[in-house]
Image (spheres, rainbow, N blue to C red):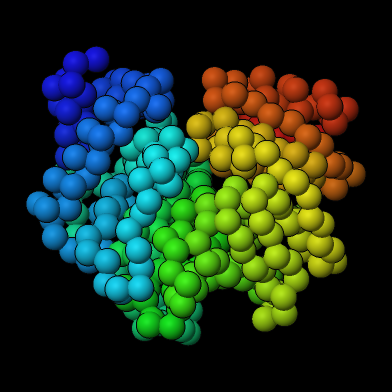
Amino acid sequence: MEREYFKYLFDLYISGNGTEAQRNELFDYIRSNHTDESLIALMDEHYDRIREEVPSSAFVSRYGDISLPGSIPDPKVRPLKTQRYRLWAAAAILLLLVTAGAVYLADAPQKPVVGIASHPDTASTNVVASVTTIRTGNKEQKLIVLADSTRILVNGATILRFPDTFGKDKREIYLEGEAYFDVQHAAEWPFIIHTPEGVSTIVLGTAFNIKAYPGRKQLIVSVVTGKVKITKDTKAISVLGNGQEMRLTTSNNKIEERQVAPLLVDSWQRGDINLVDETMADIVKDLQIFYGINIRLNNPSLTNLVLTIGFKKQTSVESALRILCELADARFDKTKDGYVVY
């Protein structure tokens, strides 16, 4: 692909004027060339240009479709190291803010407006007076870049809340769902993610994934690089390092720590799905998010069955359900609003 044509497709995407075919062409090219140094440099150039055109300490499309950082307000925060940025580029930022197949909001205008996205939301948290709230639907992903250069890739069916301005002593955000974090290191400015079940993850600077959907059997924190401390109701329950994962069973507070491969942690960012030792109930919920189709489990005896299963992004929903049902000795049928597994 010619450099000028790539820039043309990129600008169409950022402006919101590109067709679905043009977005797919752009995503496919980036995925197949994610180690190309010249491509990474070109991406850097484009992001710098956008930051100059829209100056702001932190901004987000009011529909959450794009978010880029401006100036970093705290002198304790160091710029991202080049190598660390490239790792993120290969893992997430080269997905161009929204992965291929993301569902655009039906009532969003053709050309997204970029600006401060915030509103009072004190019902969600008593810690801050005003927060930005990002919501994703099933089969939808968004990349958010905070003012401190922390990058958050948000998975489907997720709610993410963060304050308009971080406090001087700590950075706190609130997550219901799944997201992959690359947190900008600041030794005296801890980054804290609050999730359901009273669980909080305290970060000094690292890349990791949190899966914390309300109603799931397990809450999962997986560390790719760095170190995190996890608390429940303010009590420390786990400390994780490179390649480690903690699973909290929400019904009985059972904690399990294990090793985990980074390729499994970030597979959803590439459009794939890999579920290791997860219950049937949680797998069905994940498939519903992954495919954006209503899938209902109608067999209580299967709810707590633990399985390991994975699918590539090209796998159809019926093929995935067929494999799942073979493993679980179950059946599925198509309904007028989706599928039922029994």
The mark total stands at 0
Q: Position of residue 151 (x, y in %)?
A: 40, 54
Quadrant housing the N terminus: top left
From the viewer's side, name the closer residue of 146 and 306.
146
Q: Residue at x 61, y 71 (%)?
A: 200
Q: Position of residue 101 (x, y in %)?
A: 42, 31
Q: Residue at x 27, y 57 (%)?
A: 69
260 in relation to 135, above or below = above
213 in relation to 331, above or below = below
Could you tell whether 185 is left or right of 112 in the image?
A: right
Q: Position of residue 293 (x, y in %)?
A: 56, 36
Q: Position of residue 39 (x, y in %)?
A: 28, 28
Could you tell whether 219 is left or right of 105 in the image?
A: right
**Residue at the farthest left position:** 53
Quadrant housing the C terminus: top right
Q: Residue at x 72, y 79 (%)?
A: 235
264 in relation to 74, above or below = above
Could you tell whether 66 is left or right of 247 in the image?
A: left
Could you tell whether 47 is left or right of 184 in the image?
A: left
168 in relation to 159, above or below = below
From the viewer's side, name the closer residue of 338 and 3.
3
Q: Is residue 261 visible?
A: yes
Q: Is residue 102 visible?
A: no
**Residue at the farthest top position:** 1
